[in-house]
Image (cartoon, coloured by chain):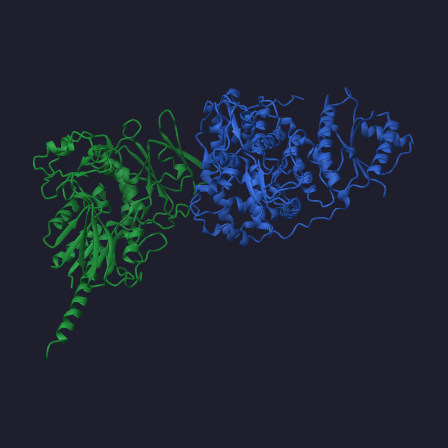
Amino acid sequence: MAESVLIIGGGVCGIQAALDLADKGMHVYMVEKEPSIGGRMALLDKVFPTNDCSICILAPKMITCFNHPNVDVLTCAEVEGLSGKAGGFKVKVRKHARYVDENKCTGCDACTQACVLKGRIPDEWNQNFGMRGAAYIPFMQAVPRVAIIDPEECLLLTKGKCKSKCVEACQRGAIDFEQKDETVTLDAGAVIVATGLDMYDPTPVTEYGYGRFENVIHSMEYERLINASGPTGGHLKRRSDGERPKRIAYIQCVGARDVRSGHPYCCSVCCMYATKDAMLAYMHHDDTENIIFYTDLRAFGRGFDEYIRRGADEYGITYVRARPGEVTEDPETKNLYVWYEDTEGGGVKSMEFDMVVLSTAFVPPPGVRTLSEKLGVIMDEHDFFKAQDDLLSPMDTNVPGIYIAGACTRPMDVTDAVTQGGGAADRAAQAIIEFSGKASAKAGSGKPS
Amino acid sequence: MAEPEIVAFVCNWCAYAGADYAGVSRIQYPTNVRLVRVMCSGRVEPSFILKALEEGADGVLVGGCHEADCHYISGNLKAREQVESTKELLDLLGLGADRLRIKWVNANEGEVFASEILDFVTTLKKMGPNPLAKAKKIAAGTPPAVEEIMSNTDAYLCVECGKCTASCPVSRRDPEFSPRATVEQSLENKHAELETSRQLWDCLTCRTCEERCPYNVRFSEFIRDSRPEARALGLDGCPTQSGQMYSWMRMMAADNLPQQRTSWTEGLKTKEKATAKKDVMFFVGCLPHFNLSHSHVGANSLDIARNSVAILNAIGITPVVLPDERCCGHDLLFAGDAANFEALAKKNAALIKAAGVKRIVISCPEGYETLAKEYPRVLKDWDVGVVHISELLAGRLDAGKLEFKNPVDATVTYQDPCRLGRYMGVYDAPRKVLEAIPGVELVEMPHSGQDAICCGVSSWVSCGSTAKSIQMARLAEAKSTGADVLVTACPKCQIHFRCALSGRVPGDREAVDIPIEDLTSLVARALGVLESPAPAKAKSRSKS
């Protein structure tokens, strides 16, 4: 009888679930495919509707979770298979080689500074705005703060030839090129799936020129640019000339509420985060003009509507009800023109901007379909995990003992993800008690009365 | 036979006066003629002549002043030009050029007028009655109900976000045209207003809006299927050339009018029937007809047909070309004449079946879309595969079975035709073909592929200042790429752009003037089989 709960995904939702369970005295395995836990939220600058610094409120939870005596965090790890049933799952997990000994590494950055490829590989953690080396630490507040060596880029691992300056630099001897992928089998009484979300790549929406026009960026790129620990130290800069944008357009529903991209659903958070993004630009420089082009303003949560109103009243954000048809570029200035129909006053208009930010859809991350097949959990047609009953058992799946939570079930904000994490933790704890109870009841019935 | 009926368009100053003189002088001549007085013979457009014949007249006479006598200086010369090309058209259509005459008659030449009529009657008697008079009339059919149109095109899903309007090349120039407002109007139960509005005819059906609509509302189809109702109300969208193209397209729907459309194949290898299973047909479409109707803009549409067959011959294909092929019906369908479109579709299907063909190669994107997408919609047993010539060539290139030997030194830019691109999804094949030609450098316009801007007119409606403005913007884009030639794969794009350049051009001519060439002519040059000379700049319309 296993009393552990396995949590797939180490974002804010998974962390909440882990902490709730661990604090109850239950054991948790957390499987995270990236080298750090924290998920999307760790990369955001601020979060609505309070405009709290995202990492400031998340980092303590990340560290508590990682250091909790009842939590075992497996980073660079993926679930390969699952057998057994509720109360006694056996989960096969592949732990990808990090080529750095987690127990030895202190996160001192010596290897990342020494790497011969330093500053030559686009840094995906900074949405490719910054550069990193083959040995790197994903981001400043990474947990665990342990370096990793990129096996697809490292010269020694790809070509077999490198001066291996990282090995030289590491005083703890933590670099280990002999490390191999490991497969472990974990016993778990219950499983929580909290694999989170990915952002839609807006390249196919050719009319907005993402990928073609340098100053058209998407919202995740914006988050990193305006983030003090991001590649520009929190200075919003245009990709074309490094200048500060003074007029910024935000285009809503890019790839969302869009049947062509396969995401007909509303992402529920973009109206809010675009407002937040615009507020941030204004907070940095109050001569910034922000215009949000929206389809419908959907501010449904507590304090949300007030937030939008504050955006308009105190931060001077202009809300225009239109989905722009096209973005064009002035080849000289690299400024952008947003073409839209004035759906209230009539006529097609264009406005000039220094920067256009596309509020892109939340989409399920790659690989979740395969994961769902391994777990036997049903998904909906958009590759979100499907609850047994959306109304009355939103955390339960078709498989007893496997629960779902967070943005892997539908697009949602931090608040909802945390709520669901807590909910799923409770369902998982309930399952463990239920199945342990049954087991001990059986054992008890064997005793002479 | 019954006495032939003649419609005579006579000019006010000479020919009508001549006829009048014949009357007052009591000169006897056959009474088969109905006179229509016009101010000048130059006013007689081909559409007038075609309309008379379509309605069953056995012959048409155009009467004007003698050369140098025209009261409007050169109207009569213009009339002669029009009549000459219309005669050729009548031959193509199987009606016979001799059903049309032009005669200079002075105000005092009553005798001349009378003898001309007498002679014409004799000729017409020999030719027999106009088959179109006896042809079965095609009933208009019931236009689809608005609810049906709305649900077929997903118009009910519209969220009125305006992305369509902001994408529309027409809306950008004409503030009264808004696809969003149009759909909204119908959603509000006011579809009848659309039916009688100009906006119904302003849409280019270019599908730019549809390409971007987040809810896949098929606005082009919505417009297409709303037009029959307007037509039933007697409305049309101010067709170009007073609808002459519609006339000859409708004429082709007649059963008893065998076409004579293959004289241009001389010197090329073609056959009339499939002799082997793998035989392909080259569907010519209206290329020979456009060549005549748009000779004034230097359309050279026939070059596309000749080059296409020459290319097919060069890669070892002897295509079936049907002398009796009909118009594919595209323009009638999109102009709201669904009944005649269906009649043409049935006619073509029967002819193609009889020729034993299972596969068609086509150079016209509109025909391609019609044969591949619209025919299966209206014909039950249509199972013929259709491929655009660019796809055929790209396939050969991919398989390593084709190589272009002759270099064509040119920087080119490519205009994606709406039907080939957004309707059929063919973007890569023409580019692949162009890039395979040694010496050709392909540069893209800022709007290309699915974002390409339409050539400004579709199915011969609403050719006005908005169209011209779109064309100028597009030509300026092409020119700004630094390309030597604007290549397109559609005869209509070519006609529209050449037309835009043939008259006076607003602003700087240098900024828009670029030679326009069809893809097939570049390929023909690269294969060394060019049938026609390299393109000259669009010829300027004569000042007269």
Decide if residue A435 is on the left or right side of residue B385: left
Q: Is residue B44 visible?
A: no
> Which residue lies at the image location 67% right of the left edge and 36% below the top edge?
B244
In percent of width and height, residue A413 lies at 26, 50
The tint chain B carries is blue
In-front residue for pair A202/A273: A202
| The image quarter in which residue B77 lies | top right
| The image quarter in which residue B333 lies | top right
The tint chain A carries is green
In percent of width and height, residue B470 lies at 52, 31
Quadrant the C terminus of chain A occupies: bottom left
Residue furthest to the left in view is A171
Decide if residue B282 is on the left or right side of residue B123: left
Residue furthest to the front in view is B276
In percent of width and height, residue A23 lies at 12, 57
In percent of width and height, residue A331 lies at 38, 26
Decide if residue B328 is on the left or right side of residue A282: right
> Which residue lies at the image location 16% right of the left edge and 46% below the top edge?
A57
| The image quarter in which residue B326 lies | top right
In-front residue for pair A325/A12: A12
